[in-house]
Amino acid sequence: MALKLNVGKCTLLGNYRENNEDAIEVKHYPDLDICIVADGMGGQAAGEVASKHAIEVIPRELRRGLSQAHGVDQIKSVIRRSIVSANEEIIQMSNLDREMKNMGTTVVTAVWRKENEIYIAGVGDSRAYLIRNGKIEQLTVDHSLAQALVEAKTISPAEAKDHRFKNVLWKYLGTREVGDGPDVKIVPIMPGDRFILCTDGLTGVVGDDRIVQFVLSHPDVQECADGLGQLALDSGSKDNVSVIVIEVAEVK
């Protein structure tokens, strides 16, 4: 069974920001599809620079490395290295320019090699979700202090949702904590699957239940992406909002 991806994307400045520090990218190649969402941080325009650099470097390194990759372990390694390369370049840029000091960005990416699985990787608190058979599953882990407290069993997942450290990140591109790169999750795919890549401009104000209800009621991927962005703003988001909606479809 031949599969294809239908992709919708949306990035919004929002009602309270002067500039959009988010960046999104969708690349379609004959043998490869790449979708990336990044949420920049830092003074002045530094966050904007970091997020845009991430969405330029990662596809470049993926394209270069995956052409020679065979087998799951090699593919995972290339994906991790592409994110590490972006991290190293962002750190170098911040060291060379005082105005870019301490800049950084989250990143979440979906990589599809035209086969029966998608590779998901993320750093920071931008998220990837899978919606299948009416149920939603978060595929990435937030690298926030609140989530770290959950993993240490200091607080509960419910408490983390409103914790004062929920937006304080301990790992993102621009930090040495990225190390050898993030975990890469392999997700077998089937027609009807929907993947959501998004910044916390959406997830900070719209819960998982509302996201899945909205996605199920908006079959067109572009309308769905635009609608999720507007839903975040209507729900009071004070951040930039970026969303990529990916539908797995059968080639007919």
Image (spheres, grey):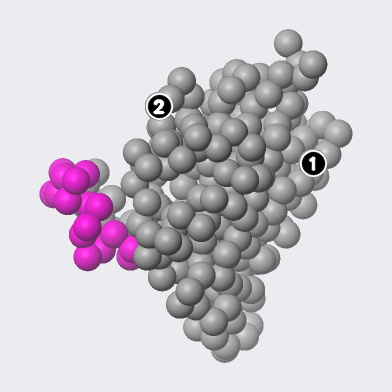
Find disc 1 in the rendering and name its residue: 28
Pick the residue in front: 178 or 138.
Answer: 138
Q: Is residue 160 magenta?
A: yes
**Residue type for callout 1:** His
Q: Is residue 78 left or right of residue 240?
A: right
Q: Can see residue 216?
A: yes
Q: Is residue 5 magenta?
A: no
Residue at point 50%, 35% (across, down)? 217
Residue 181: mark: none
Q: Is residue 213 left or right of residue 100?
A: left
**Residue type for callout 2:** Lys
Residue at point 21%, 44% (across, down)? 157
On the image, the x and y values in percent for residue 138 come to 41, 37
Q: Is residue 160 above or below residue 105?
A: above
In the picture as drawn, the residue positioned furthest to the right comes out as 30
Residue at point 46%, 40% (across, down)? 214
Quarter location, residue 33: top right
Q: Secondary structure at mark 1?
A: strand
On the image, the x and y values in percent for residue 87 come to 58, 61
On the image, the x and y values in percent for residue 249 come to 68, 24
Label 2 CA crowd tier, 10 Å (few <14, some 14–19, many 20+) = few
Magenta span: 153-172
Residue 135: mark: 2
Label 1 CA crowd tier, 10 Å (few <14, some 14–19, many 20+) = few
Q: Is residue 102 left or right of residue 165?
A: right
